[in-house]
Image (spheres, rainbow, N blue to C red):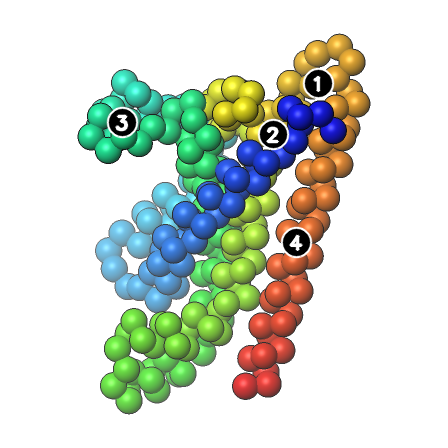
Amino acid sequence: MTPEEWTAVRLSLLVATTATLASLPVGVAIAWLLARGRFWGKGLLDTLVHLPLILPPVVTGYLLLITFGRKAPVGAFLADELGIVFAFRWTGAALACGIMGFPLMVRAIRLSIEAVDRRLESAAGTLGAHPVLVFATITLPLCLPGVIAGAILCFAKAMGEFGATITFVSNIPGETQTLPSLIYTFTQVPGGDAGAFRLTLVSIALSMAALLGSELLAQRIGVRQMAA
């Protein structure tokens, strides 16, 4: 592999990891709200969370551009006041990938939380445990396989995200050129088939490794829970 290809691989791993880790706390909180909460607007929140799944990725990327671009109100405020820039930076690629993978993460975690026996949570609450303590000591450990599955789904989606990313942060070598973007570039130039094929194999290998790792980790957690 060429240095350009290794750079794209490292950048993709950085973007996908950042997107997953940044989304995970919010994803767990939203999933818990949707699984356990009773409030006005719950259906609207559920719709907003899953909207990136049905919108064309280019539309999501354009919405990010007009929201977080350097001349956009939010983007200008973040850049001028906090020094945070998303447009045409790898951080913007992480933001786009996180948003595209967020619905998959939330859905997996929500289903896992809904599978937890509420009687266990009620018993802890009856004994005087604070709701936060109940979640941390009962709900979260029991739904941990679902949390892992959701994180891996988000990571895999981030590794393969193309439309929203290239619309929001373009295809800048060394800055925003991820694996899918470089594969697309190779397909547009004569003689680029070999590079595209190599990176395709790398993408498949990374995705399979992530899925296998999550399966093994979930099984290990399940065995520990049964032993306990």
Residue 141 vs 42, above or below: the answer is below
Q: Which residue is mark 1?
A: 187
Closer-to-camera residue (215/112): 215
- Tell me which numbered mark, 4 or 3, is placed earlier along the sequence: 3
x, y (%) of residue 90? 46, 30
Look at label 1 and name its amino acid.
Thr
- Tell me which numbered mark, 2 or 3, is placed earlier along the sequence: 2
Residue drawn at x 69%, y 19% is: 186
Look at label 3 and name its amino acid.
Ala
Measured in 3D between alpha carbons, the distance from the residue under mark 4 to the one under mark 2, in whole angstroms, is 23 Å
Question: Is any part of residue 168 visible from this angle?
Answer: no
- Tell me which numbered mark, 2 or 1, is placed earlier along the sequence: 2
Q: Are marks 4 and 2 in contact (CB under 8 Å)?
A: no
| Callout 2 secondary element | helix
Q: Quadrant of residue 133?
A: bottom left
Tell which residue pokes out farthest to the bottom in this image. Answer: 127
Q: Residues within 10 Å of mark 3 (few under 14, many from 20)?
A: some
Q: Are marks 2 and 1 in contact (CB under 8 Å)?
A: no
74 relative position to 5: left or right: left
Between disc 3 and disc 1, the foreground one is 3
Tell which residue pokes out farthest to the top in this image. Answer: 190
| Callout 4 secondary element | helix
Residue drawn at x 71%, y 25% is: 2
Measured in 3D between alpha carbons, the distance from the residue under mark 1 to the one under mark 4, in whole angstroms, is 27 Å
Residue 47 vs 118, above or below: the answer is above
| Callout 1 secondary element | helix
x, y (%) of residue 69? 33, 22
